[in-house]
Each structure stands twice: as C-alpha cells, then as structure tokens.
C-alpha cells in the first residue's frame, strides 16, 4: 500500500477485525472502502471523533443509505477516482 512507507498502516478485509482493531488500538484516521450499509453505519456511529474517509463505487440504489452515513464521515469519494478533482 502506498501509505505504508510514510505511515503506520493497518489493513483488513474482515469486518470483525475492523471492530477489534478499533477497540484495541489508537488510530489517527479510518479509510473505509465499502458501500454504505447498516453494518458500516453502526460501526462509524460509535467511533467518532475519529476522522473517516469512505470510498465506494457510486450507484443510485444506495443513495438513501449514503445519506445516513454522511453525517458520520468527513469525506466521501466515489470510485473510480478523478485525480484532477482531488
């Protein structure tokens, strides 16, 4: 991962591991690559004030779920990324 050379980075693909890591370690930021869903919403509700960046492939059918999580995250990025906009 690009950031590992400059920062201490912890990665996982397992949702239960995320919960475990957040309870047992101190993090400066959380980057989630996941579509908004109820599990994610419940997770991020309980970890504020940790800065959260969420990325996912935009689809219209989850706009209502996205609106639920927006108030808990700092930044939302749609994939694929447009680096000129960033």
Image (cartoon, grey):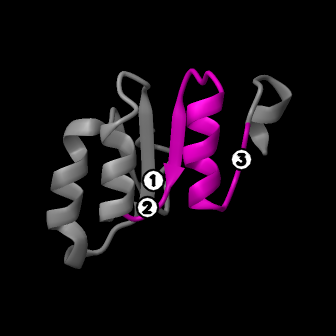
Left or right: residue 32 compared with residue 66: right
The reply to whether residue 30 is visible in this rendering is: yes
Q: CA distance from mark 2 to mark 3?
A: 17 Å
Residue lying furthest bottom: 61
Which residue is drawn at the image coordinates 35% and 27% (left, top)?
A: 48
**Which of the two residues, 85 or 18, is positioned nearer the viewer here?**
18
Please name which of the two marks, 1 or 3, marks the residue nearer to the observer: 3
Q: Secondary structure at mark 3?
A: loop
Magenta segment: 10-35
- Which dot marks residue 55? 1
Label 1, label 2: how many angstroms apart (C-alpha)?
Answer: 4 Å
Q: Is residue 21 one of those drawn in magenta? A: yes
Q: Quadrant of the C terminus?
A: top left
Q: Residues within 10 Å of mark 3 (few under 14, many from 20)?
A: few
Percent position of residue 59, x then y: 29, 74
Q: Earlier in the sequence, mark 2 or mark 3?
A: 3
Q: Earlier in the sequence, mark 1 or mark 3?
A: 3
Residue 67 lies in quadrant: bottom left
> In the rendered structure, are the residues bearing label 1 and label 2 in contact, judged by CB atoms less than 8 Å apart?
yes
Residue drawn at x 65%, y 52% is: 17
* Front residue of 53 and 16: 16
Which residue extends farthest right?
A: 5
Residue visible at 46% across and 52% down?
Answer: 82
Left or right of 65, for residue 55:
right
Of marks 2 and 3, the one in the foreground? 3
Going 35% across and 37% down the picture, which residue do you hit?
75
Q: Mark 1 to mark 3: distance in Å? A: 15 Å
The residue under label 2 is 56
Quarter of the picture holding the N terminus: top right
**Residue corresponding to mark 3:** 11
Q: Position of residue 73 (x, y in %)?
A: 32, 37
**Element under disc 2:** strand
């Amino acid at each position: 991962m690009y950031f590992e050379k400059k920062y201490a980075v912890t990665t996982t693909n397992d949702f239960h591991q995320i919960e475990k890591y957040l309870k047992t370690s101190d993090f400066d930021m959380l980057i989630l690559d996941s579509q908004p869903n109820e599990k994610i919403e419940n997770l991020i509700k309980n970890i504020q004030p940790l800065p959260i960046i969420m990325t996912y492939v935009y689809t219209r059918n989850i706009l209502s779920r996205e609106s639920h999580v927006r108030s808990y995250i700092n930044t939302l990025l749609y994939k694929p990324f447009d680096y000129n906009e960033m």
